[in-house]
Image (cartoon, grey):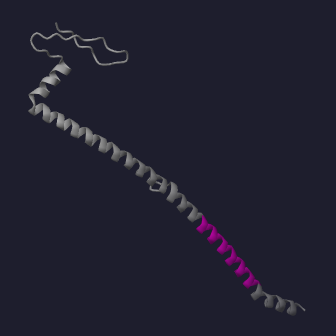
Amino acid sequence: MEHKSESGTLDRLPAMAEAARDRFFHVRRRLATFGVGALAAVMGYGVFFGHNGITMFAHKRSEERDLQLQMQRLQVENDRLREHVDRLQNDPGAIEHQAREELHYTRAGEVIYTLPAKPGDTRPVPPVTP
């Protein structure tokens, strides 16, 4: 009988090996699927929220628009100042106007009256020249 039971075990051995191999491949397939899913989740997070992700790209695009607007405003201001410098270099009337406005220069016989500063006005009040 012993011989028969050994033979029965030996007969079942290939089937047991096949079942173990199937379980191993099933577990390995599940682990691989989980690993690929986890890798995809990490990569997806990086695509959206990473250093060069979509959210950072949108932020940089908004920053670029703001800088373009600022650059346009500064260009307009630069052109205005360039025209003002050109007038001061070439127009004696512009020089006189600037001197009278900022430095309170007067011609002979003129009198300048300066009113007190408004509350909240931080400009210094120039002296009154008789």
Report x, y in % for residue 96.
Answer: 12, 23
Reply yes or no: does residue 31 show up in magenta.
Answer: yes
Q: Quadrant of residue 117?
A: top left
Q: Which residues are magenta?
A: 16-37
Q: Which residue lies at the image location 30% right of the left edge and 41% below the top edge?
A: 73
Question: The C terminus lies in which quarter of the figure?
Answer: top left
Q: Which residue lies at the image location 23% right of the left edge and 39% below the top edge?
A: 78
Report x, y in % for residue 114.
Answer: 24, 11
Q: Which one is in front, 96 or 29? A: 96
Residue 61 falls left or right of residue 91: right
Q: From this viewpoint, which residue is outermost toward the top? A: 130
Residue 8 falls left or right of residue 37: right
Q: Quadrant of residue 40?
A: bottom right
Q: Which residue lies at the image location 9% right of the left edge and 33% below the top edge?
A: 90
Q: Which residue lies at the image location 18% right of the left edge and 38% below the top edge?
A: 82
Reply yes or no: does residue 127 show up in magenta.
Answer: no
Report x, y in % for residue 107.
Answer: 10, 14
Can you say whether 56 is above or below 27 in the image?
Answer: above
Report x, y in % for residue 123.
Answer: 29, 19
Q: From this viewpoint, which residue is outermost toward the right? A: 1
Can you say whether 129 is above or below 44 in the image?
Answer: above
Residue 61 falls left or right of residue 72: right
